[in-house]
Amino acid sequence: MIRDAAGRFGFTPSLVVGLLAAVLVALVSVTSGAYPLAFTDILSVITGREASDPVASMVLLEVRMPRFLLGFLVGAVLAVSGALLQGLFRNPLADPGLIGVSAGASLAAIAVIVLGNTWLGGWLAMTGEWALPIAAFLGGSGTVLLAWRIANRSGQTAVATLLLAGIAINAVAGAATGLLTFYANDEELRSLTFWTMGSLGHAGWDDLLVGAPFMLLALLAAPLLARPLDAFLLGESVVGHLGYRTDTVKKVAILVVGLGVGAAVAVSGLIGFVGLVVPHLVRQLLGASHRVVLPLSALVGGTLLVAADSLARVVVAPAELPIGLMMALIGGPFFLALLLRTKVI
């Protein structure tokens, strides 16, 4: 009975191992960097005692903690979004960039960087320091709605048309991004380059305030789609026979992905491979049930991104590598090996 209840709520030995790994990675994340912290400094802050090093308390509370929380949320929402799309399309190679979310968010952010002092001066004056994240969020969400509108015919959403719409949106957004890059000056090019590579270096409580509500909403909504997505594995015709409205499931899944990925890209830039590798790996190890895949993808995705960020901070310390570049270096070869082993291609 206990085992059945544990399985029903996704409480498995794998989840326990994942939680322990997440705690270990969290400790490494908040203690490593250009200014290393001791475990005693963390205990002092947690217990409310005065730390022996005031700088350590400031670094922990104002730099490391928001960076860890933001990194974990971004990794979790990217992995869960990948799991939703892979289940919806019944394709292990689907990822959040497939329907144009990342491209739209990137284009909007780059437009703010390049045109902020000219055509978009009014936008900067209205939104202030939040101009870039808000624009990226609106750009990502807008491309999802556009792709959905293109694919929607007579109240039905064709998945194949949605994928083709995503490819077309990615192409147009890529061309527009290239045009903006061509017109950017040297300072804008530097900011643009680091943003498109992804970074958590600017992470602060303000970034969490902007992105966390939307990412948390996406993470909380995703498990509600677990059973319908399990039905999708048997084919769309089976979904209706089991009592689910096929098009409603598609709409909700796409909107959840747009909400989560748009917010993630808005606060961290473009970070690839998390949404592609993590859910695929979880399925290979633990099966295809989305009641297990979704929570464990969130846990593994968040842990992986925090671990990669910690590594990026120490590889070339005191400087740091962009987290998107680090994930490409880790995720690319790993996913290729995974594909060759499982013979997906």
Image (spheres, helix red, strand yellow):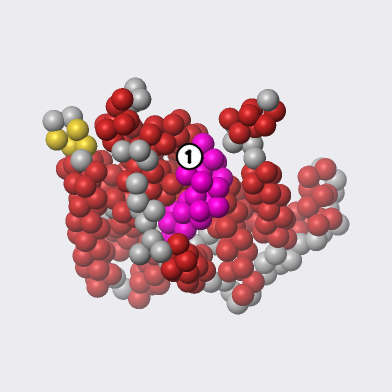
Query: How many numbered marks appear?
Result: 1
Q: Which residues are magenta?
A: 272-296
Q: Is residue 263 above or below residue 157?
A: below
Quarter of the figure with residue 247: top left
Q: Is residue 226 above or below residue 327?
A: above
Q: Nearer the viewer, residue 306 or 137?
A: 306
Q: Nearer the viewer, residue 269 or 18?
A: 18
The residue at the far top in this view is 243
Q: Nearer the viewer, residue 6 or 137?
A: 6
Q: Which residue is mark 1?
A: 290
Residue located at (39% from left, 53% from top): 92
Instruction: Label 1, secondary structure: give it.
Output: helix
* Residue 76 seen from this side: no
Q: Is residue 253 above or below residue 187?
A: above
Q: Position of residue 272 (x, y in %)?
A: 43, 61
Q: Position of residue 208 (x, y in %)?
A: 53, 45
Is residue 273 magenta-colored? yes
* Residue 179 seen from this side: yes
Magenta residues: mostly which secondary structure?
A: helix
Q: Position of residue 271 (x, y in %)?
A: 44, 60
Q: Position of residue 31 (x, y in %)?
A: 72, 60
